[in-house]
Image: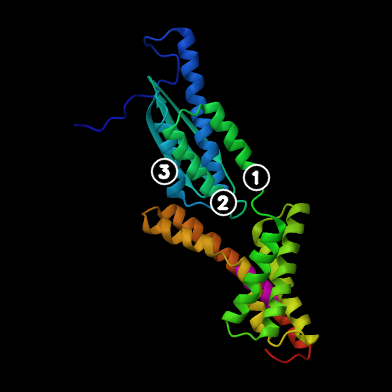
Amino acid sequence: MPYRIPFQSTGDEDSEDNFSSAQKKARKAKARNTMNMAILAGEIMLESGAETYRVEDTIIRLCKAIDIVNYVDVFVIPTGIFLTVGYDNNINTVLKRTKPKSVDLNKISLVNQFSRRFVTTNMTLDEAIDYLSKLRGLKPYSDFVKSVLGGGLVGGFSALLFGGSFPDFVSAFFVSLIVVKSREAVARKINIISYVKDFLGSLVAGALAILFVSLGIGASVDKIIIGSIMPMVPGLAITNATRDSISGDFLAGVSRASEAILCALSIAFGVGVAIKYYTYFNIGGM
């Protein structure tokens, strides 16, 4: 039996059927709201660092929960969503361009919970869009969590993990803290790409590590630098690249891998510039 899409694109949504004009308008509006809701959910997940297969699965779940939808197909890459939804004898396709903003596992978890609640309850499309709009505006984490837990402690314990001493832990803690806070401050004032922020962050980390050792606070420049750049290491991008590639989505996998490589090169270049001028200081411990 030849393959056939459940219906054909007519290019005209007012095709022949048994619905009145008012019913056609209502179904047309419902289909568009369905696409808006699904795209918004997918956009939040992509911007928060979710894997592409998870975004595709969520969008399909949401669209299939709507009674008038009889066909849905979606293609997601790290920077865009292609969604096709069909109802009655009509088919609509939308393309949404997205940009990764930050890693926010809390938002990804909340959208996952929302999708499961949406398909099992009588939540309306307007309620769903309103919930997702509020969810999108949530602040990812408090400044304390990002700077102290996500910056200072990660940097300090990473220095210990790579063989640093207690003075190195203290130095890496404060260097990481300063790097995270300065990157946030720069991001709020200037709209620059993440690779530039990574370069500047690693440059600051290298310079401060040298300064802390010269002041006698730290013992090893290399251990402090290694610890303080850990919060910037693209671990999520590497993980997503691996998972997308294993699941067969090589386009998304290569895209994520390219992002991780560029991020790693930016960090290495920033540290390299700082170390280049290290020879101008008579500091031991490296």
Q: In the drawing, what numbered circle is on residue 106?
A: 2
Colour mapping: rainbow
Q: Nearer the viewer, mark 2 or mark 3?
A: 2
Quadrant, the N terminus: top left
Name the residue tied to disc 1: 138
Q: What is the residue that sits farthest to the top in this orientation?
A: 20
Disc with the residue nearer the chain's start (1 vs 3): 3
- Estimate how packed mark 2 is, as few (under 14), some (14 to 19) or many (20 or more) residues with alpha carbons within 10 Å: few
Which residue occupies the foreground of this view, 18 or 180?
A: 180
**Disc 3 residue type?**
Asp
Task: Give, as a single range, the part of the protein colored magenta.
Answer: 265-273
**Is 226 inside the magenta-drawn segment?**
no
**Disc 2 residue type?**
Asn
Q: Quadrant of residue 204?
A: bottom right
Name the residue tied to disc 3: 57
Image location of residue 179, percent across then percent down: 72, 67
Q: Quadrant of residue 184?
A: bottom right
Which residue occupies the foreground of this view, 96 or 31?
A: 31
Mark yes or no: residue 229 visible.
no
39 relative to 167 in the view: left or right: left
As helix, strand or loop, the secondary structure at mark 2 comes to helix
Mark yes or no: residue 37 visible.
yes
